[in-house]
Amino acid sequence: MTDHVLPDVLGPGLRVVFCGTQAGSISARRGAYYAGPGNKFWKTLFETGLIPEPLGPADFLELPRYGIGFTDVAKGTSGPDTALMRHHVDIAGFLAKIHEHAPAIVAFNGKRAAQSVLGGGSGSRLAYGLQPSLLVGSRVFILPSTSGAASGYWSIEPWRELAALVKETSF
């Protein structure tokens, strides 16, 4: 897929690459990651110490200076996760990007994104936290989604665990 709704923010030496399913409708309209008004992503990055200053969606291109990148498993579509169809997901393309850029950690923002790549049937089989296997050489971490639509599953604790792991990772 060459028509990406949001650009990848990838490069060498990243500590963590956050991976969602697809851009939400508001993020697509605004051209920025995690731009929905109910999304906790930016607040959580700051609260957990993953970034040293409060930033917002318009600042997403600044995150590599903190060792943070972005991508999605479905780059050519946008909308709620319920609208995501199997043929929207480009697993081979996603894995090639991760292999090429070799981030220390791939952090899936939600079980649905992780399930798209890792399998496991329903998302309930996947546990939050650090996973036992690598993904093309990168450690894998599954997080509760920051989406307002997933607020019933929200917990900041796995995000704090990720922040501690990221701080241990050289940059």
Image: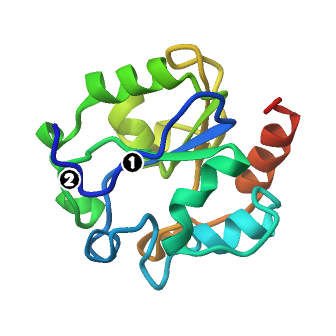
- Taking the spot 33% from the left edge, 76% from the top edge, the residue there is 30
Residue 15 falls in which quadrant of the image?
top right
Residue density around tag 1, few if under 14, some if 14–19, many if 20 or more, within 10 Å: many
Residue 120 falls in which quadrant of the image?
top left
Residue 88 falls in which quadrant of the image?
top left
- Residue that protrudes farthest toward the bottom in the picture: 37
Whether the residues at callouts 1 and 2 have beta carbons within 8 Å, the answer is: yes
- Point out which mark residue 112 bears: 1
Q: How far across and down, in percent of the image, does residue 51 sit? A: 76, 60
Q: Mark 2 points at which residue?
A: 84
- Taking the spot 67% from the left edge, 27% from the top edge, the residue there is 104
- Taking the spot 81% from the left edge, 38% from the top edge, the residue there is 165
Upstream in the sequence, badge 1 or badge 2?
A: 2
140 lies above or below 36: above
Which quarter of the figure is the N terminus placed in? top left
Query: SS of the residue at dot 1?
Result: helix
Q: Nearer the viewer, residue 60 or 136?
A: 60
- Point out which mark residue 167 bears: none
Q: How far across and down, in percent of the image, does residue 54 sit? A: 72, 75
Marks 1 and 2 sit apart, C-alpha to C-alpha, by 10 Å
